[in-house]
Amino acid sequence: MTTSSSQRFTSADRYLPTRLAAWPISSVATSRGLQTAVEGQRPKVALQNITLEYKTNGSHLLALDHINLQVKAGEFLCIVGPSGCGKSTLLHLIAGLQQPTSGTVLIDGEPVHAPGTDRILIFQELGLLSNSA
């Protein structure tokens, strides 16, 4: 499997699901069947050199480190990894619920600065209503 020059894989990557998700996809399943990804097509979602760092008690916690990812329209992408590795953090950045320390999140070539009607994040657990409601 080949990777582009913008992708770096290190031994620490086994804990960073966003790097696993960056592996190239040559064919994608869509509602119209199996299609070959079009080279040169503008990505639907692009992460450019995303870094997210939290400041806690005078120290810094690096949550995401120089993540580069492109997802074209029609591609199917899974982000997998152990608890606490940054999967939800990455989705929060794409949804516009959180801003990266550095780097750019693009949807259809436009920077993401806040939540928008062009994307949605559905939480896995109930966040607003208790089970007794």
Image (tube, helix red, strand yellow):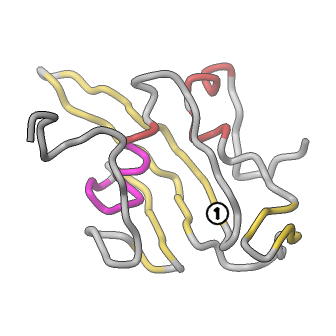
The residue segment tinted magenta is 89-99
Is 4 placed left or right of 97 in the picture?
right
Quadrant of the frame with the N terminus: top right
Residue 97 on the magenta span = yes
Image quadrant assignment for residue 112: bottom left
- Name the residue carrying label 1: 71
Magenta segment main secondary structure = helix
Query: In front here: 18 or 75?
Result: 75
Image quadrant assignment for residue 18: top right
Please determine whether, in this image, residue 104 is positioned above or below residue 42: above
Is 42 placed left or right of 115 in the picture?
right
Query: In front here: 1 or 26?
Result: 26
Task: Count all numbered tags in the image, as a single digit.
Answer: 1
- State the image coordinates of residue 41 (x, y, percent, origin top left): 74, 79
Please determine whether, in this image, residue 16 is positioned above or below residue 47: above
Q: What's the residue at 74%, 69% (across, down)?
A: 30
- State the image coordinates of residue 83 (x, y, percent, origin top left): 43, 22
Query: In front here: 19 or 61?
Result: 19
Q: What's the residue at 53%, 79% (across, down)?
A: 108
